Image: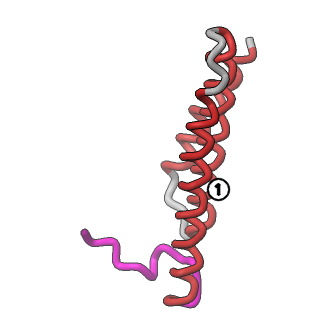
Amino acid sequence: MQISKLIIIYILSIYIYSMKFNKFIMTLISIEILMLTTVSIMLILLSKLNLEFMIIYFLVIMVSESVLGLSLLILMSRIYNNDSLSVMNMKW
């Protein structure tokens, strides 16, 4: 029952992430919600297999991803003076 609620939250967070946000901070927040639901699902599934220590590796990757996103947000706000994604030229 609990895992089905988490899967619904996961699907909703993917939907929120796919929406076109103007602000970079909103994109980062939606990615964090996605990662938190992933951690919750992994914790439930790995606890049944007695592999809770594996969640630490995923949390380390999640924290480094968050730090990278926040540093990009700070860099972008210093260069462009706002965090609007429409200011950036997103051509690869």
Circle 1 sits on which residue? 29
Question: On the image, which quarter does residue 29 sit in?
Answer: bottom right
Please name the predominant secondary structure of the magenta segment in the image: loop
Q: Given the image, on which type of amino acid does mark 1 rest?
A: Ile
The answer to whether 2 appears left or right of 22 in the picture is: right
Residue in the picture at 71% in, 22% down: 5
Q: Is residue 2 magenta?
A: no
Residue in the picture at 45% in, 82% down: 87
Residue in the picture at 54% in, 77% down: 84
Badge 1 density bin: few <14, some 14–19, many ≥20, Cα 10 Å: some
Q: Is residue 90 magenta?
A: yes
Most distant residue in the right direction: 2
The answer to whether 6 appears left or right of 92 in the picture is: right
Would you place residue 61 above or below residue 23 in this image? above
Residue 59, given in percent of the width and then of the height, sits at 62, 41
What segment is highlighted magenta in the picture? 81-92
Question: On the image, which quarter does residue 24 sit in?
Answer: bottom right
Residue 10, given in percent of the width and then of the height, sits at 60, 33
Would you place residue 28 above or below residue 84 in this image? above
Q: Nearer the viewer, residue 23 or 35?
A: 35
Question: On the image, which quarter does residue 83 sit in?
Answer: bottom right
Image quadrant for the C terminus?
Answer: bottom left
SS assignment at label 1: helix
